[in-house]
Image: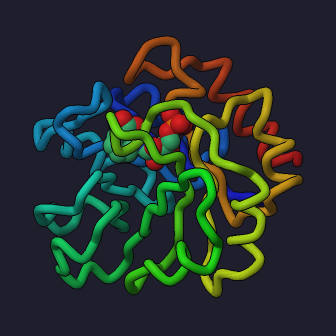
Amino acid sequence: MTKVKICGLTRQQDAELALEFGADAVGFIHEPKSPRFVGEGEYKWIERLAPFAPKIAVFGRVDRPVPQGVFDLVQGVEWEIFPVPYPKRIHVLRLRNGQKADDLINQTVNASALMLDAYKEEAYGGTGHQVDWNLAAEIVQRAERRVILAGGLTPENVAEAIRRVRPYAVDVASGVESAPGVKDAAKLRDFIQAAKQA
Ligand SMILES: O=C(O)c1ccccc1N[C@@H]1O[C@H](COP(=O)(O)O)[C@@H](O)[C@H]1O
């Protein structure tokens, strides 16, 4: 069964709802320019969430350490810039038109998993833009690591994305929101259900 990560949570009630609906992992944005940014003031409730669901600290560039004990994995692009030996890292590959699967896979640095998202000049993520699912499927087949599909997924398209790409997990931020940083309960439920049934 495909795993589901719900990302860009800013409110405790949304995180708890996502976990209740069956999310396998929850992500918290550490990129100050994002409307989904969470600061250290939020760590108290994040720390207390269900202990068996990994909590992921999400960066654009990983340019600073996160305090130990709150997060289980760290997600980001351009790991070379901050080569701290986090034991568990998710390396985000931002796909552009015309790229080749092997060139992308070769960029990976010591990652537990790869995440595929759409390249956009203006932001590191959370843009709602879809990746090329054919290229994503090729990366899934060739990469010797687990692949998480992100970028423009919604309750309506996630099942088809899973059938075409066959990722280890799917990840969503804007596709289950009513406003940036605010999750919509029905969209959360429908997304998780559709992904698990695909
Ligand atoms: O969501 C953000 O604001 C964000 C900011 C900086 C880095 C990553 C971010 N989000 C990641 O982008 C994917 C895809 O977002 P979307 O579903 O297309 O809106 C999201 O799942 C996060 O991992």
Residue drawn at x 29%, y 52% is: 60
Q: Is residue 118 above or below residue 177?
A: below
In what quadrant of the picture does the N terminus appear? Answer: bottom right
Residue drawn at x 77%, y 44% is: 195
Relative horizontal placement of residue 195, taking residue 117 as reference (left or right): right
The front one of 32 and 50 is 32
Relative horizontal placement of residue 11, taking residue 119 as reference (left or right): left
Percent across and percent down for residue 120 are 43, 40
Percent across and percent down for residue 178 are 51, 12
Kindly tell me whether residue 4 is visible in this rendering. no
Q: Is residue 172 above or below residue 60?
A: above
Q: Residue furthest top?
A: 178
- How many numbered dots are placed on residues in this image? 0
Colouring scheme, one of rainbow, by chain, secondary structure, one colour: rainbow
Residue drawn at x 23%, y 84% is: 85
Quadrant in the rendering for residue 81: bottom left
Quadrant in the rendering for residue 110: bottom left
Percent across and percent down for residue 133 are 75, 52
Percent across and percent down for residue 68 are 17, 68
Q: Is residue 2 above or below residue 20?
A: below
